[in-house]
C-alpha cells in the first residue's frame, strides 16, 4: 500500500513524502573543513538599539552577528562596552584561571581522582564576560559548562575541587555528579543534569523577584542542543507573557555531544531568531568576542533591570574539545574543525586586544598563566587532603538519609539503622578502601 503512489485527477503521480535528516558537514577524515560559508560581518557594523526598545527593533540582530573586536585587535562600533584596561586584565585573569582549572581537572579525571569532568575550552567568554556584566547577586541558573561564572563570583577553587572529588569536604555531600555545583551564597542555582530544566526555573525566579518588588534579575545559560527541550519553550512563553526580568543565554557551540546543531533546528533558523516568535528581544553575538559578549549581556541586564523586558541571546561559538571526559569527538567530527574555526579563540583575542592597547605583553601573559596553574595546583593539593574518588574519604555513610526532612521520619531512621548494621556485619574491621 505504502509504496503505491496516489494519482491526482490529471493522472499524475503524487510524490512520495520524504523527511530531511540533518547531516553534519564534516565527518572524521572525510572532506576538508571549509567554514567559508559562515557569514562573519565586520566588527562594529551592527546597530545598537536602546535597551528599552520594542523587541521588534532587535529582530534584525537575530540573524546578524554582534561583533566588537576586529581583525586589527581593536574595538569597533556602538557595542564597544568601553571597559578600562584594569577590567580587561581582570577578565583575562579569569580566563587564565578557568583554562588552568579545566586542564588540571581533566588530568585529574584521567588519573582516577574523579569520575567525570567537563571543560569549557573556547567558550570562556560566554560565561566569564557575561557574568562580569551582571551584578554579583543577580541569580544565575547555569548549565554544566559555566564554571567561569563561579570563578568570576570568587567561589573558592578548593570548594569546586572538593565537589569534583566527592570527598569529605564536598558541601553537596556526594549527592551531585562532579561539576554540578550549587552555592546559595553566590546566587548560583544547583546545576541539573536534566537538560533545560534551569530555564523555566530562571523565569519563575525572575517572576518571583518582581512579585516581591526586589531589584535582582535572573539569567540562565542553556546549550543550543537543549533548546530542543520543551522546557526551553515554556520558559520563553512565560518570559514573554509576564515580561519577566530574565536573560536567556543560548550557548550555540554547535554540538550536543555527537549531534550537530542541525538536530536542534539550527539549519533552518538561527537560535536567536526563536526570540521573534515569542516576541522577545533577541541578539546574536560572536561568542568568541569577549567585548561583544560583555556588551550584549549588559544590554540585556539593563533592559531587565528597568522593567523593559526579557532578552534571548544566542552566543555563536565552538566547542573546541570533547563534550566531557567520557567523550571522544574524533569518532564523529573532523579534528580540523577546531583549527579552521573562523572566530578564533576568546583568550587570544582579548590578550591581543590588550597588547594592541599597549596595556599588556607576552611576558606578562606567560607569568599570569604560570601563576594560574600554580594556584590551581596548590588548591588541588589542599583539596586532596579531604580525599579523592574511591579513597573512602567521603561524607559519612549515614548522611545519605539526612537533609530531606527537617526531622528524620521513623521509616528512614529504621532504614538508616538497618543499613549501618548490615555494613558492620559485612565489614567488621571497617570498610576496605
Ligand atoms: C533531558 C536530557 N536529555 C538528554 C541528556 C543527555 N545529554 C547530556 S548533555 C547532552 C548534550 C547537550 O548539548 P547542548 O545543549 O548543546 O550543550 P553543550 O553540551 O554543547 O554545552 C545530552 C544529550 C540529559 N542529560 N538530559
Ligand atoms: Mg552545544
Image (tube, grey):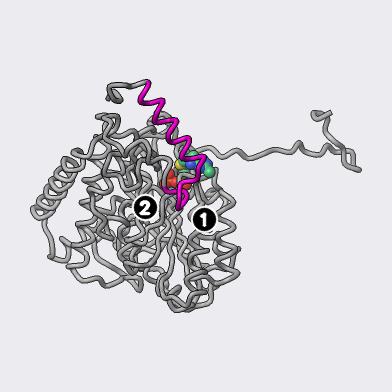
Give the answer, above or below, for where 215 lies relative to 101.
below
Name the residue that disc number 2 marks.
Answer: 182
Q: Position of residue 331 (x, y in %)?
A: 41, 29
Q: Quadrant of residue 432?
A: top left
Residue nearest the observer in this picture, 418 or 19: 418
- In terms of sequence position, does the residue under pointer 1 or pointer 2 come before the other? 2
Q: Tell me, for residue 394, which label it has, or none.
A: none
Label 1 Cα neighbours within 10 Å, binned few <14 / some 14-19 / many ≥20:
some
Left or right of 221? Residue 134 is: left
Label 2 Cα neighbours within 10 Å, binned few <14 / some 14-19 / many ≥20:
many
Q: Quadrant of the N terminus?
A: top right
Q: Tag count in the figure?
A: 2
Q: Position of residue 154 (x, y in %)?
A: 25, 59
Tell me the SS state at disc 1.
loop
Q: Quadrant of residue 373?
A: top left
Residue nearest the observer in this picture, 54 or 7: 54
Instruction: Give the residue at x 36% y 35%.
Output: 397
- Seen as rendered, the residue at the extreme right is 9
Instruction: Give the residue at x 16% y 66%.
Output: 357
Measure how far apart labels 1 and 2 are at the Cα level. 31 Å
Stretch of the chain drawn in magenta: 403-425
Left or right of 414? Residue 90 is: left
Name the residue that disc number 1 marks.
Answer: 270
Q: Position of residue 430 (x, y in %)?
A: 28, 25
Instruction: Give the residue at x 48% y 54%.
Output: 198
Asked whether residue 217 is drawn in magenta, I would say: no
The answer as to whether callout 1 falls within 8 Å of ligand 2 is no
Q: Quadrant of the C terminus?
A: top left
Q: Position of residue 306 (x, y in %)?
A: 44, 79
Residue nearest the observer in this picture, 409 or 160: 409
Helix, strand or loop for the magenta stretch, by majority: helix
Residue 256: tell me if it is visible.
no
Amino acid at each position: 500500500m505504502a509504496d503505491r503512489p496516489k494519482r491526482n485527477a490529471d493522472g499524475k503521480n503524487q510524490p512520495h513524502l520524504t523527511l530531511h535528516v540533518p547531516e553534519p558537514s564534516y565527518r572524521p577524515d572525510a572532506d576538508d573543513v571549509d567554514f567559508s560559508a559562515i557569514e562573519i560581518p565586520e566588527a562594529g557594523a551592527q546597530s545598537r538599539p536602546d535597551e528599552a526598545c520594542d523587541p521588534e527593533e532587535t529582530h534584525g540582530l537575530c540573524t546578524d552577528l554582534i561583533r566588537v573586536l576586529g581583525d586589527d585587535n581593536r574595538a569597533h562600533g556602538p557595542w564597544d562596552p568601553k571597559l578600562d584596561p584594569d577590567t580587561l586584565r581582570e577578565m583575562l585573569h579569569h580566563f587564565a584561571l578557568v583554562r588552568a582549572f579545566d586542564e588540571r581537572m581533566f588530568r585529574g579525571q584521567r588519573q582516577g581522582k574523579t569520575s567525570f569532568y567537563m571543560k569549557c575550552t573556547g567558550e570562556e567568554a560566554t560565561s566569564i564576560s557575561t557574568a562580569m556584566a551582571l551584578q554579583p547577586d543577580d541569580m544565575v541558573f547555569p548549565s554544566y559548562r559555566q564554571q567561569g561564572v563561579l570563578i568570576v563570583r570568587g567561589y573558592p577553587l578548593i570548594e569546586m575541587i572538593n565537589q569534583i572529588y566527592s570527598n569529605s569536604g564536598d558541601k553537596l555531600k556526594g549527592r551531585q555528579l562532579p561539576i554540578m555545583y550549587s552555592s546559595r551564597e553566590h546566587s548560583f542555582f544547583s546545576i541539573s543534569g536534566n537538560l533545560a530544566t534551569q530555564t523555566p526555573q530562571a523565569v519563575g525566579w525572575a517572576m518571583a523577584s518582581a512579585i516581591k518588588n526586589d531589584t535582582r534579575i535572573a539569567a540562565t545559560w542553556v546549550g543550543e542542543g537543549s533548546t530542543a527541550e520543551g522546557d526551553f519553550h515554556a520558559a520563553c512563553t512565560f518570559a514573554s507573557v509576564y515580561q519577566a526580568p530574565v536573560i536567556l543565554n543560548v550557548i550555540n557551540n554547535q554540538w550536543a555531544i555527537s549531534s550537530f546543531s542541525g538536530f536542534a533546528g539550527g539549519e533552518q533558523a538561527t537560535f536567536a531568531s526563536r526570540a521573534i516568535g515569542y516576541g522577545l528581544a533577541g541578539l546574536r553575538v560572536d561568542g568568541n568576542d569577549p567585548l561583544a559578549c560583555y556588551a550584549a549581556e549588559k544590554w540585556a541586564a539593563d533592559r531587565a533591570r528597568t522593567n523593559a523586558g526579557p532578552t534571548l541571546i544566542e552566543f555563536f561559538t565552538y566547542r573546541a574539545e570533547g563534550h566531557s571526559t567520557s567523550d571522544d569527538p574524533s569518532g564523529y567530527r573532523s579534528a580540523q574543525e577546531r583549527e579552521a574555526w573562523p572566530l578564533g579563540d576568546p583568550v587570544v583575542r582579548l590578550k591581543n586586544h590588550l597588547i594592541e592597547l599597549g596595556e599588556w605583553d607576552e611576558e606578562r601573559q606567560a607569568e599570569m598563566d604560570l601563576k594560574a596553574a600554580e594556584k590551581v595546583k596548590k588548591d588541588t593539593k589542599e583539596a586532596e587532603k579531604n580525599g579523592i574518588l574511591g579513597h573512602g574519604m567521603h561524607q559519612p555513610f549515614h548522611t545519605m538519609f539526612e537533609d530531606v526532612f527537617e526531622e528524620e521520619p521513623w521509616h528512614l531512621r529504621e532504614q538508616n539503622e538497618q543499613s549501618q548494621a548490615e555494613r558492620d556485619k559485612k565489614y567488621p574491621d571497617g570498610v576496605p578502601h
